[in-house]
Image: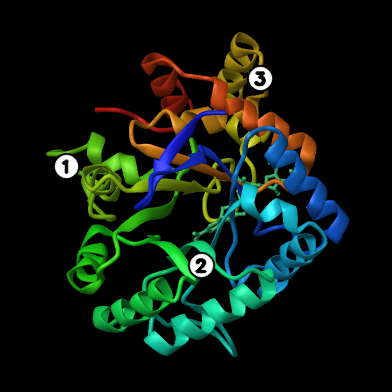
Amino acid sequence: MRYITLGQDDKELSEIVLGMMRIEDKSVKEVEELVETALSVGINAFDLADIYGRGRCEELLGLVLKNRPDLREKMWIQSKCGIRIEEFTYFDFSKDYIIKSVDGILQRLKIDNLDSLLLHRPDALMEADQVAEAFEILHTSGKVRDFGASNQNPMMMELLKKEVKQPLSINQLQLSAAFTPGFESGFHVNMEGNKAAVRDGSVFEYCKLNDMVIQAWSVLQFGYFKGNFVGNEKFQQLNQVLNRLALKYSVSPSAIAIAWVLRYPAKMQAVVGTTNPKHLIEASQASKVNLTRKEWYEIYIAAGNDLP
Ligand SMILES: NC(=O)c1ccc[n+]([C@@H]2O[C@H](COP(=O)([O-])OP(=O)(O)OC[C@H]3O[C@@H](n4cnc5c(N)ncnc54)[C@H](OP(=O)(O)O)[C@@H]3O)[C@@H](O)[C@H]2O)c1
């Protein structure tokens, strides 16, 4: 497993993160097995959010940690807040809501502190000074070590940085071989047509410039939760390339798809959302693959993209 460094104390984190959004229906024993499997292949980073399973995913990991407190020190645990699911879903980055959310997260996880907290989805009504106050309280009380954002564009992060004292170490963004809007405008700069439109404010380049870790989510999905593209007949050309490279590198096609994300030259992590220990072991093998530039582009094009 390869590792990146993150945050104020350069914590070493695996480039594969276990995303725990889909564990809601698993038993405590199954979640324990998944965590043990992750640790056994060198994965030490775990991603949650307060809304996953409406809190159930955090609760399940909390029950694992209650039975197995020895696991905590081996794990870097991240969660997110800021999405409120009530009669309808909306976003809330107010000071009181952030602080209350973290208390709920810690209670469900049965731990005293979070290694990292991300603001889940941008709140247009965000007042950065409120976020700053919340982060300061959470940091000085020892409840949260590192902070970051998710799905935020550069100007949103600049707004936050104007007030927030702690570094924003992470941006968690959707990226997969079959989901690349963030790269398209970069390839089509100075050209006519929609592909040149900069919709995300060059967020990938911004994260690199600011030495932020990019955590790619849904690395095997196409569209917005439209399904897995690996082995999917809608992506025949892509799967042909993934299968060929899987043979070349002696890993699974999914591992090649994950290696594609990790090949982007930034501090990259791939958040993998499997709930199946076997799939997790396969995914972890992405970390031993270093795709060539030509292979990276071949996958990009086989996914249906074009270059000028
Ligand atoms: N910040 C955000 O807004 C945001 C949004 C969505 C997700 N996330 C984070 O990203 C994580 C991953 O998201 P995701 O679950 O959509 O992404 P994913 O890793 O692309 O997809 C996981 C799904 O693919 C299936 N799968 C099938 N074959 C697989 C294989 N060989 N290896 C791995 N998975 C395989 C898994 O099923 P099995 O369980 O059967 O393997 C699971 O249903 C989440 O857990 C969450 O932590 C963040």
Q: Position of residue 83 (x, y in %)?
A: 50, 76
The x, y position of residue 123, in whole percent, is 36, 77
Location of the C terminus (image quadrant): top left
Residue type, numbered disc 2: Lys
Task: Indicate yes or no: mark 3 CB to ligand 1 under 8 Å.
Answer: no
Q: Amino acid at mark 3?
A: Val
Estimate the x, y position of residue 60 in percent, counting from the top left. 76, 65
Of residues 304 and 250, the one drawn nearer to the viewer in this rendering? 250
Disc 2 under 8 Å from ligand 1? The reply is yes
Residue 199 drawn above or below residue 162: above
| First in sequence: mark 3 vs mark 2 | 2
Element type at mark 1:
loop
Circle 1: residue type: Glu
The label number, if any, that marks residue 192 in the structure image:
1
Above or below, 72 against 108 in this view is: above
2 vs 1, front mark: 2
Q: Residue at x 30, y 45 (%)?
A: 204
Where residue 246 sits, quadrant-wise, is top right
As displayed, is residue 64 above or below residue 3?
below
- Which residue is rendered at x = 42% and y = 28% of the image? 263
Measure the C-alpha gap from mark 1 to mark 3: 40 Å
Q: Residue at x 46, y 76 (%)?
A: 82
Is 254 left, or right, of 119 in this rendering?
right
Q: Which residue is mark 2?
A: 80
Along the viewing direction, whichever of 281 and 39 lies nearer the viewer: 39
Front label number (3 vs 2): 2
Q: Decide which of tag 1 and tag 3 comes sooner along the chain.
A: 1
Q: CA distance from mark 2 to mark 1?
A: 38 Å
> What residue is shown with label 3?
251
